[in-house]
Amino acid sequence: MLLAALICASFSACATAQAPDDAAVCSAYSAQRSGVEVVAQGRVTRIFGIQAGRSSPHEGFLFRLDSGCALVVRVESNTDFTGAIPLSIGQSVLVKGEYEYYPLGGVIHWTHRDPRGRHENGYVDVGGTMYY
């Protein structure tokens, strides 16, 4: 708990989640743009679980945007930072991270803090609990 409080003190997103802007994801997808910081809300449609990644384990899932283009997007979270995120199919989640285009919907990654401070911090908010 103390560690979480210390992290929260240095990470502004701990206090409140940002409002979703699903249209920004839809726009990035339509324009085939990558490297776009987004905040999106949707419902979990598939859970991949935790798998080994290039640098550390990642937890992946698909979610369908609540508004805009109803796009299905993959989300990847570095579990070295977030820990395991309790998810279930149909659950509403709010995600902040970097969108990368690919034809099947794209991926939102960097959904965690960057301890080196070189990238904007992200998070996954599940039922008001933030994983970052």
Image (tube, rainbow, N blue to C red):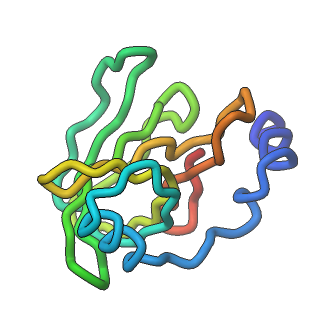
Q: Farthest residue in the left direction?
A: 104
Q: Quadrant of residue 67?
A: bottom left
Please, is residue 104 above or below residue 128 in the view? above
Q: Front-most of 102 and 12? A: 102
Which residue is found at the position 59% from the left and 55% from the top? Answer: 130
Position of the C terminus, as image quadrant, is: top right
Report the number of discs: 0
Indicate the position of residue 48 as horizontal and vertical percent values: 21, 39
Quick one: 129 or 68, which is closer to the camera?
A: 68
Find residue 52 and report its horizontal and vertical position in percent.
31, 18
Which residue: 44% across, 15% down?
Answer: 55
Q: Is residue 84 above or below residue 73?
A: above
Q: Is residue 1 left or right of 43 when viewed as pictured?
A: right
- Camera-side residue: 35 or 75? 35
Q: Residue at x 36, y 41 (%)?
A: 76
Which residue, as the protein is rendered here, is positioned at the far bottom? 67
Q: Residue at x 35, y 48 (%)?
A: 100
Q: Is residue 93 left or right of residue 65?
A: right
Q: Quadrant of residue 22?
A: bottom left
Residue 115, x across and y down, in percent: 71, 29
Give residue 57's position: percent from left, percent from top.
39, 22
* 45 sits to left or right of 49: left
* Quadrant that contains the N terminus: top right
